Image: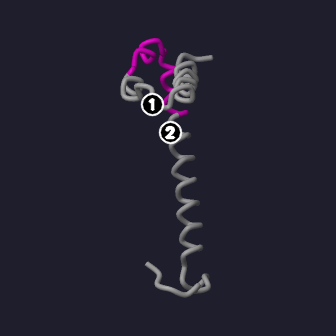
Amino acid sequence: MTNYNRFLHEAIRRRHRDPGADIIEHMFDTSWIADLDADQACAAITATQDVLREKEWHELRLAGHWAVLNDPDSTTPTGGDRA
């Protein structure tokens, strides 16, 4: 397990154990970066970008679904005012 993966695993474990844990302190704890070599740093960047792209795609799919559900041409009015 790479240092990056160990860091993420530990951060997730702490977050589940105590949702109010010092999140700001953990967000800025960059000591694990110093242990990464060039290949590990590159892999960590790539993994981060992959996760970000997947989350953005998930958000777009949800927005599209919301738009279909709220399209006046595809919904049946239920009476009352719509905001």
Residue 74, by quadrant, is: bottom right
Q: Nearer the viewer, residue 36 or 79?
A: 79
- Which region shows up in magenta? 29-47
Residue at the image position 56 percent from the left and 66 percent from the top: 64
The quadrant holding residue 65 is bottom right
Q: Which residue is mark 2?
A: 49
Residue plotted at (55% across, 33% down): 47
Mark 1 vs mark 2: give the one in front.
1
Residue 42 is situated, as x and y percent measured from the top left of the image, at 50, 26
Q: Is residue 59 magenta?
A: no
Q: Secondary structure at mark 2?
A: helix
Mark seen at residue 20: 1
Query: Element under label 1?
Result: loop
Question: Label 2 sits on what residue type?
Answer: Gln
Tell me the quadrant of the picture where the C terminus can be found: bottom left
Counting every numbered tag in the picture gives 2
Up/down of 21 relative to 81, above or below: above
Q: Residue furthest front?
A: 80
Q: Residue at left 40%, top 25%? A: 22
Q: Is residue 12 left or right of residue 31?
A: right
